[in-house]
């Protein structure tokens, strides 16, 4: 079975996913109601991989995007990964291919912890900018590591004010997901057995990403009355070097439209500032939480390894 046949056959029937009563349907939307989705990748951990060299991984991810109509992604870089000659060289390939380069802090520290002060966190944002600012495709968009925007209202508001003062917009995701949890299992398996069959991990990954996409799209319709231009959370890792092309094929086979990240970020939803504590998660999740009307549909955190690990355990992954 080739890649396109696989993605056409994947989950075309109705999928029932028991999270808060939202039923995920495999029915294809008409063009008028066609969901739109952009690829956003976090971290840029180019030196953490088995199976592929850093150059091979970079080439594979960029190639998958290029082969799908020259799709332009957003890469949110933890700048410590680009603060060396090799990292800069790999990132330059993204820049030259006209992908959006954005700030994911320097050190990838989590704001929602007591030891991380707003002073330390905001200084780390600026340190990241010093590494990234000379890339022509750099834009002042900031994504919070772990999607955590402050465990108190004070921390939340101080960092939001800082970002505005320095010309940054929040690079929210609308579709949160846990590809990194699948990556951890895949890499561990390949470290133990380099010849292991990767197809079960691909199957699980695609199923997981489809479930989460439909869940957040349905939540968007419930909370906002419309399907927003989506940004999906993904990571620069082996999993996506191997299967990004399959993922893009899958969305197209289900009549979701692939759009450039810069287009997606023009959606008004990205200007929202939900006043919830703890702050963060998917912007759709946060908006729904703020209304107080959808608590039966929400879990906290919205996505985490514990949810997917339990399912992978049952499958022997």
Image: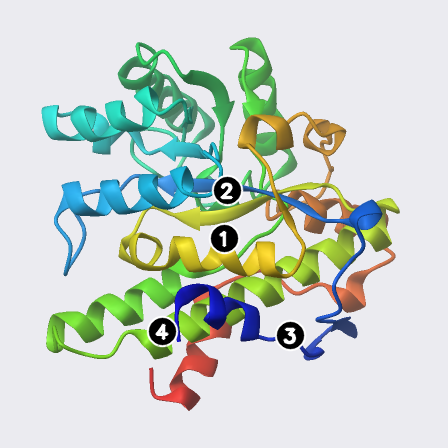
Q: Residue at x 60, y 18 (%)?
A: 161
Q: How is the image coloured?
A: rainbow
Circles 1, 2 touching at the beta carbon (< 8 Å): yes
Between circles 4 and 3, the one closer to the viewer is: 3
Circles 1, 4 touching at the beta carbon (< 8 Å): no
The percent position of residue 87, horizontal first and vertical second, equals 18, 30
Could you tell which of marks 4 and 3 lies nearer the N-terminus? Answer: 3
Q: CA distance from mark 1 to mark 3?
A: 15 Å
Please tell me in which quadrant of the rendered image residue 261 appears: top right
Q: The N terminus appears in which quarter of the rendering? A: bottom left
Mark 1 highlights which residue? 248
Mark 4 secondary-structure assignment: helix
Mark 4 highlights which residue? 201
Decide: is 239 above or below 276.
below
Q: Which mark identifies residue 154?
A: none
Q: CA distance from mark 4 to mark 3?
A: 19 Å
Mark 3 highlights which residue? 12
Would you say 227 lies left or right of 173 here? Answer: right
Q: CA distance from mark 1 to mark 4?
A: 16 Å
Residue 60: tell me if it is visible: yes
Mark 2 highlights which residue? 39
Circles 4, 3 touching at the beta carbon (< 8 Å): no
Between circles 2 and 3, the one closer to the viewer is: 3
The percent position of residue 198, horizontal first and vertical second, equals 28, 74
Q: The C terminus appears in which quarter of the rendering? A: bottom left
């Amino acid at each position: 079975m080739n890649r396109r046949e696989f993605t056409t056959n994947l989950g075309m029937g109705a999928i029932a996913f028991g999270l808060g009563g939202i039923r995920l349907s495999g029915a294809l939307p008409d063009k008028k109601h066609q969901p739109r989705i952009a690829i956003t990748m976090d971290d840029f951990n180019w030196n953490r991989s088995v199976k592929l060299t850093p150059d091979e991984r970079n080439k594979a991810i960029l190639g998958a995007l290029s082969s799908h109509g020259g799709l332009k992604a957003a890469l949110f870089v933890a700048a410590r990964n680009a603060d060396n000659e090799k990292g800069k060289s790999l990132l330059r390939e993204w820049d030259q291919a006209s992908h959006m380069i954005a700030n994911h802090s320097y050190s990838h520290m989590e704001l929602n912890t007591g030891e991380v002060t707003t002073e330390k966190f905001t200084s780390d944002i600026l340190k990241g900018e010093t590494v990234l600012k000379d890339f022509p495709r750099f834009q002042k968009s900031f994504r919070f590591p772990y999607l955590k925007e402050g465990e108190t209202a004070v921390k939340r508001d101080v960092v939001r004010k800082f970002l505005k003062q320095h010309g940054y917009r929040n690079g929210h995701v609308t579709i949160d997901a846990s590809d990194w949890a699948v990556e951890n299992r895949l890499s561990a398996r390949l470290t133990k057995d380099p010849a292991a069959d990767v197809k079960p991990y691909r199957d699980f990954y695609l199923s997981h990403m489809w479930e989460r996409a439909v869940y957040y799209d349905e939540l968007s319709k419930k909370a906002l009355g419309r399907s927003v231009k989506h940004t999906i959370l993904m990571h620069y890792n082996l999993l996506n070097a191997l299967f990004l092309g399959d993922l893009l094929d899958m969305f197209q086979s289900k009549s979701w439209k692939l759009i450039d990240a810069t287009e997606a970020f023009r959606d008004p939803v990205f200007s929202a500032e939900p006043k919830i504590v703890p702050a963060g998660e998917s912007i759709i999740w946060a908006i729904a939480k703020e209304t107080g009307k959808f608590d039966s549909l929400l879990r906290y955190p919205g996505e985490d390894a514990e949810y997917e690990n339990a399912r992978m355990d049952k499958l022997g992954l």
